[in-house]
Amino acid sequence: MSESTVPVVVKGLRHSFNSGVTRPEAWRRSQLLRMRDMLVEREADFEAALHADLGKSPLESQITEIGFLIGEIDHTLANLSKWMRPRRVATPLAVQPATAKIVPEPLGLALIIAPWNYPLMLALSPLIGSIAAGNAAIVKPSEIAPATSAVLALLTPEYLDRRAIAVVEGGVPETTALLAERFDHIFYTGNGRVGRIVARAAAEHLTPITLELGGKSPVYIDETVNLSEAAKRIAWGKFMNVGQTCVAPDYVLGRAEVLAKLAPKLADAIHELYGSAVQRNPDYGRIVSDAQFKRLVNYLGDGEIVVGGSHDAETRFIEPTVLAGVSRDSSVMQDEIFGPILPLVAVESLDDALDYVNAHDKPLAAYVFSNDSQVRARWQSETSSGALSYGVPVMHLTVPDLPFGGVGESGQGAYHGERSFEVFSHMKAVLSKPLQPDTLSATVMPPFTGAKEKIVRKVLGKLR
Ligand code: NAD
């Protein structure tokens, strides 16, 4: 499919949506079940593609992509009838007798643009919400994960209803052609620079958008926690998918003496997770591209390497690396790292850490390792981030009832679970009032008599 075919594809899908095929609950359920079948029956194809793109081990692909999606499909199927049901709401006295309800309806045709780091999960997870809400959709996978993109383009039409769901592969020209079209929702996951391009294109058609962006997600740690246990969790969250995770801990803030004790614990944790010969460990993946590899290797000089540091351009391998004594104005502390390099940045105090985080863009997540309830409470009330987790990184995104999304530079809008259904739905207000009794003539309609004034001012106003 090339950029020139984009208008034809859009027209076909819109026609299908307008014909009503995507609206019945039965269609939504059948498509979700077919997607489930695709993930189960073609698991080996997806695992091979994810390995080709990112060196992902089959089990990591299961945990973070395929299994995650199956869990999300099952949760959606279990709750779909409830989510689709109109919700009755109360009516104020001035409107009674009447019934009011919120009726979810599909938006129309959605565009889903996915990035390369979890190239399967981030393409299909929004699609689950779009199907659940009864929309037609185009999925545009990332060209930087070409194997996964190709498998999605091959299998999606085999399993899902091609009248209403299409995969358009490609990079900037194809995405630009897509963005010139009118959609009813655009769901974009990726970086903020392209997020702005998407927002500008959407503004042309007044299309609502969800932007799932990134940023530098901080960890704060103090002496009240068991440092070995905390180090293992931090290392797990940081080095899964070789640090190429939007909610990966980006850097660690702590007092110098805490960080000095944490560094060897991180070394132990990395050893426990990946062994002594990480380069030969099939559980540890690779950097996605040469450009990303070069960018990351430049960061290695920004601090004292206390763990790791080895790298190989040929295979795009970078060892899990911890940098100590990193200064706040070093290059590694400017942009999201998005790779297996963990800077330890000393702060004077909790206040210093809070001030540092608040002086920068609002992160996608913040992770606090402290058993001091005052410290936890201050992070919750004095900082803003897409999510805040105590004691564990990354896992909040596996809780379907927690909204997953950013704030400010880390994004707008949120999804997962019922939120995904709502993102792709319009919540239509429906009011029904019988013509009799004629309560309006006696109250709010002119001519305004003294008796009506009494009712309006004394009764209706107060009883609202
Ligand atoms: P990417 O390079 O794959 O780009 C994302 C998408 O944008 C791709 O489909 C690509 O084709 C498209 N694109 C690129 N340039 C474009 C242009 N000029 N016009 C139109 N479309 C264009 O992925 P990326 O942006 O490098 O992804 C990494 C970023 O995504 C990180 O910042 C990460 O934190 C963020 N991210 C966020 C989440 C989240 O859920 N919030 C998840 C994963 C990644």
Image (cartoon, grey):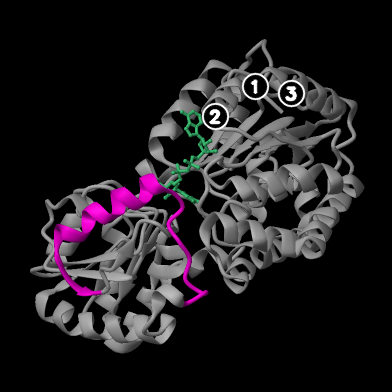
The residue at the point 68 percent across, 44 percent down is: 150
The residue at the point 56 percent across, 40 percent down is: 143
Label 1 vs label 3: CA separation? 11 Å
Beta carbon of the mark 2 residue lies under 8 A of ligand 1: no
The numbered mark, 1 or 3, whose residue comes first in the sequence reads 1
In the image, residue 333 sits, relative to residue 2, either above or below, namely below
In this view, the residue farthest toward the front is 314
| Residue 368, quarter of picture | bottom left
**Magenta stretch: includes residue 285:** yes
Beta carbon of the mark 1 residue lies under 8 A of ligand 1: no
Identify residue type, mark 2.
Arg
Q: Is residue 117 visible?
A: yes
Measuring from the top left, give residue 292's x and y in whole percent.
37, 48
In the image, residue 178 sits, relative to residue 234, either above or below, namely above
Q: Dividing the image into 4 quarters, which one contains the C terminus? A: top right
Circle 3 residue: 10
Q: Dividing the image into 4 quarters, which one contains the N terminus? A: top right
Identify residue type, mark 1.
Glu
Circle 1 residue: 3
Around disc 1, counting alpha carbons within 10 Å, would you say few (fewer than 14), some (14 to 19), or many (20 or more)? Answer: some
The answer to whether residue 316 is left or right of residue 396 is: left
Measuring from the top left, give residue 229's x and y in whole percent.
35, 87
